[in-house]
Amino acid sequence: MKINTLTKTDKLGYVFLIIAFAFGLYYANTDLNYFETVYAVEDGFVENSQFVLLLCSSLLLFYYFFKFFKHKNASWKLGVLVMAIAFFFASGEEISWGQRIFNVQSSEFFIENNAQHETNLHNMVVDGEKINKLIFSQLLTILLVIYLLILPILYRKVASIKKLANLFAVPIVKWHHTIAFLIATGLIVFVHSKKKWELYELAFAVIFLLIFINPLNKREIFTANS
């Protein structure tokens, strides 16, 4: 398995992630209260970093969309636009659409049906279960396994899969992206806190931004002549 050479951007992203995880692991195992009430708290360093990185991914995808709009077909436009909107939605959800920042009161509906009484969907409760657990965690886990482990192999081996992925501008991970996710997954086991998923989501935000900046098939999907 060939590990693609890291770019300067990759190195910066991974250094940031290593430092964030190092502090997270340290605080989670030496001062759990600090980890949960300061480091990984709502609107803290970890969550705000997630917001910024997810928003950067969305803005980068919108940049691709408008930059190459005249050169691409409808399927490419659909793929990039869907991804851009999805990451914009994820960034907004991360900070409850600025509700806490601007001190906006939740409507009665969200107060009654949201686990944190905030204006967001991922903390909504349906029949006693959080949507975050049912959809955003379990479904996302399945999608990540397919995207990070299965799709890269199929892309390299099956011509029709490669063609379809390029047609809809699906960025294909390089193996170092996959390895980074696996390492983050292994390290998160050592964080014994309900807030550990905030740190895991930070890994998601960093690595996906790196994927969008320089995917394996960048020449095929994010250039004017592709």
Image (spheres, rainbow, N blue to C red):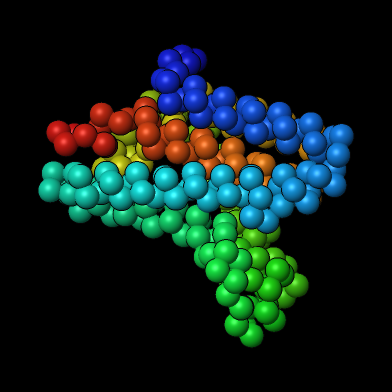
Q: Is residue 47 above or below residue 222?
A: below
Q: Is residue 158 visible?
A: no
Residue 101, x across and y down, in percent: 57, 64
Residue 70 drawn at (x, y percent): 12, 48
Determine whether 176 is above or below 68 in the image. above
Q: Residue at x 64, y 28 (%)?
A: 19
The residue located at (20%, 53%) in the rendering is 74
Q: Position of residue 174 (x, y in %)?
A: 44, 26
Q: Where does residue 133 sit, x and y in percent of width and height?
A: 68, 58
**Residue at 14 percent of width and 33 percent of height:** 225
Where, by quadrant of the figure, is residue 30 drawn?
Answer: top right
| Left or right: 25 as drawn, with respect to 149 | right
State the residue at coordinates (69%, 81%): 112
- Image quarter (top left, top right, bottom left or bottom right) of the C terminus: top left
**Which of the two residues, 84 or 51, is positioned nearer the viewer here?**
51
Residue 110 in view (yes/no): yes
- Is residue 32 shown left or right of residue 205? right
Q: Residue furthest front?
A: 102
